[in-house]
Image (cartoon, grey):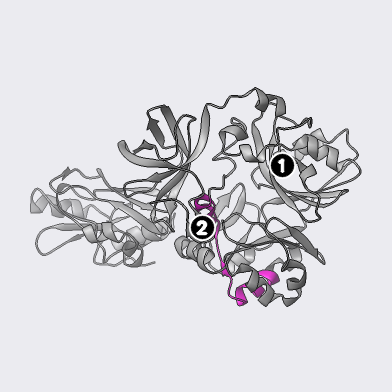
């Protein structure tokens, strides 16, 4: 299973990464894209939307099923990846390369704390394997 | 653990993603459902459909029995090997199942029924057949493989040159025996091809020979998107015992004319359908799903089967709507609390690799 060590994970199969600019980039895991199968539609949050942890904020649909995406951390949506919307299958090909949206935490300490509360790679791999 | 077809180990070894389908562990895909879909539209793919049940009916009373049992008229079948699609109805005209009936000779017919309804169908057929001179034999000893696509027939002949002689002249909806195989020019994809019924012990070898000839293994995932594009109903989603064929786009399969009395006929003659089954094309990006609510100028409705069409690259569906909704009307569909527009269209969406609706 492909679970990069440099990312943090939510049980609901999102990955999150703190970038040098202080933003937190979010996508779905390789396990999630594998379970969904061919992804054909992605709906992302509007920029400017305020998210709390666990908020339903995006939808990824495969031929088989629709899956809600939850905010792994809180903050303001400052970017949504139009390239993913235009080519949903790219998430199947590169789940960790094709991000979905970026969140700006209210302050960096809060962002860091929420990120620390997420699963590390080893813990997430266990969650994914148990499914 | 579910029931296994004779090809279960073959699917496992091929890395198929397996899912429960009507109590059977069946392959949903072998990697990509969309690629498998395109293989069938453009070349040739094969499906394990051994979970479906063949039931042989033999005896002096087979014809009168089937004339009583089925909504379509088996007396139409006069040429050996001819197949007919029919609904099996209850007294209220509700659909117990849909099936294919093959005519071999006056004393021998075969039904092929859905997996999820097989036990119910068999019990119903045995009950209805009690007073007829009839032998009812479920053929659990057979495996069934559907080889579908524009190259499907050529690929079978390449893998098994001996089958060409009996099967090359078969017209659509005809079948012929080749030894202990039945080769039928039927399918559930909207493409040309064959459905093979072979002894279970040969199934894995037939699968391997077809694959070696270039036929791609395909899962039930793309079987569903192929049949939906082809405008074919799926039992349990698009119709069941709560609706009649007249409300399910299947009036063409019911032979109401004439003196013949069949189970459900009286109810159908009395019915003035207020609902219809019609196709929908989503006019925005997205995917249609079963049970999504529909709103029209003539009242509400519901999607019965919805998906993303790999050929059209748009959301499509079959939907039960008020009978007054006409082809070309724009209706509204509720997707996660938001209304989106969809256009009513006459299925099929796609047949023989060609898009048949205007986009």
Are the residues under badges 1 and 2 in a single subunit? yes
Other-residue count near label 1 (Cα within 10 Å), few / some / many at <14 / 14–19 / ≥20: few
Residue designated by label 2: B222
- Looking at the rendered structure, the secondary structure element under dot 1 is helix
Residue under the image location 41 percent in, 37 percent down: B292
Work out whether B262 lies above or below B144: above
Residue range (magenta): B205-230
- Looking at the rendered structure, the secondary structure element under dot 2 is helix
Q: Is residue B73 left or right of residue B131?
A: left
Q: Nearer the viewer, residue B64 or B46?
A: B64
Residue designated by label 1: B119
Other-residue count near label 2 (Cα within 10 Å), few / some / many at <14 / 14–19 / ≥20: many
The part of the image, by quadrant, that contains residue B295 is top left
- Residue with the most extreme top position: B270
N-term mark: 1 or 2 = 1
Q: Which-is-in-front pick, marks 1 and 2? A: 2
Q: Residue B76, position in %: x, y?
A: 77, 45
Residue under the image location 84 percent in, 42 percent down: B63
- Judging from the image, mark 1 belongs to the subunit labelled B
Work out whether B231 lies above or below B13: above
Q: Is residue B252 left or right of residue A57?
A: right
Q: Nearer the viewer, residue B97 or B25?
A: B97
Q: Is residue B123 left or right of residue B58?
A: left
* Cα distance between the residues tagged 1 and 2: 26 Å
| Main SS of residues in magenta | helix
- Judging from the image, mark 2 belongs to the subunit labelled B
Residue under the image location 9 percent in, 48 percent down: A106
Q: Nearer the viewer, residue B34 or B142?
A: B34
Specify whether residue B184 is in view.
yes
Magenta span includes B219: yes
Q: Residue A42, position in %: x, y?
A: 30, 53
């Amino acid at each position: 299973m492909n679970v990069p060590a440099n990312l943090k994970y939510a049980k609901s199969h999102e990955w999150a990464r703190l970038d040098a600019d202080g933003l937190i980039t979010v996508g779905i895991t390789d396990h999630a894209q594998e379970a969904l199968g061919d992804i054909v539609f992605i709906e992302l949050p509007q920029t400017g939307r305020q998210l709390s942890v666990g908020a339903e904020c995006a939808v990824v649909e495969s031929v088989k099923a629709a899956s809600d995406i939850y905010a792994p951390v809180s903050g303001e949506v400052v970017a949504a990846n139009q390239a993913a919307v235009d080519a949903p299958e790219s998430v199947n090909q590169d789940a960790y390369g094709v991000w979905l949206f970026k969140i700006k935490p209210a302050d960096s300490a809060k962002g860091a704390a929420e990120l620390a509360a997420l699963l590390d790679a080893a813990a997430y791999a266990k969650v994914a394997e148990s499914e | 653990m579910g029931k296994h077809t004779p090809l279960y180990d073959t699917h496992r070894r091929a890395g198929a993603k397996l899912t429960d389908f009507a109590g059977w562990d069946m392959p949903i895909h072998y990697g990509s459902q969309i690629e498998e879909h395109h293989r069938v539209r453009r070349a040739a793919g094969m499906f394990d459909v051994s979970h479906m049940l063949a039931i042989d009916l033999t005896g002096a009373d087979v014809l009168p029995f089937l004339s009583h049992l089925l909504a379509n008229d088996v007396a139409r079948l006069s040429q050996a090997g001819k197949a007919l699609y029919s609904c099996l109805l209850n007294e209220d005209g509700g659909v117990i199942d849909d099936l294919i009936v093959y005519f071999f000779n006056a004393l021998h017919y075969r039904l092929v029924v859905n997996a999820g309804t097989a036990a119910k169908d068999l019990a119903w057929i045995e009950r209805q057949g009690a007073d007829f001179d009839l032998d009812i034999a479920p053929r659990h000893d057979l495996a069934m493989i559907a080889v579908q696509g524009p190259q499907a027939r050529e690929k079978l002949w390449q893998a098994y040159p001996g089958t060409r002689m009996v099967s090359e002249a078969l017209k659509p909806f005809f079948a012929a025996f080749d030894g202990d195989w039945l080769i039928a020019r039927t399918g559930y994809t909207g493409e040309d091809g064959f459905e093979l019924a072979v002894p279970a012990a040969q199934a894995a070898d037939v699968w391997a020979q077809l694959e070696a000839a270039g036929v791609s293994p395909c899962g039930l995932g793309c079987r569903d998107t192929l049949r939906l594009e082809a405008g074919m109903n799926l039992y349990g989603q698009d119709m069941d015992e709560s609706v009649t064929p007249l409300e399910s786009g299947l009036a063409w399969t019911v032979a109401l004319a004439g003196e013949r009395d069949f189970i459900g006929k009286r109810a159908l003659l009395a019915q003035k359908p207020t609902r219809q089954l019609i196709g929908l094309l989503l006019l925005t990006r997205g995917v249609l799903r079963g049970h999504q609510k529909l709103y029209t100028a003539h009242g509400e409705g519901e999607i019965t089967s919805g998906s993303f069409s790999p050929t059209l690259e748009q959301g499509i569906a079959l939907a039960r709507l008020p009978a007054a909704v006409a082809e070309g009307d724009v209706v509204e569909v509720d997707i996660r609390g938001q209304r989106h527009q969809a256009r009513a269209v006459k299925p099929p969406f796609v047949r023989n690799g060609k898009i048949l609706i205007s986009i």
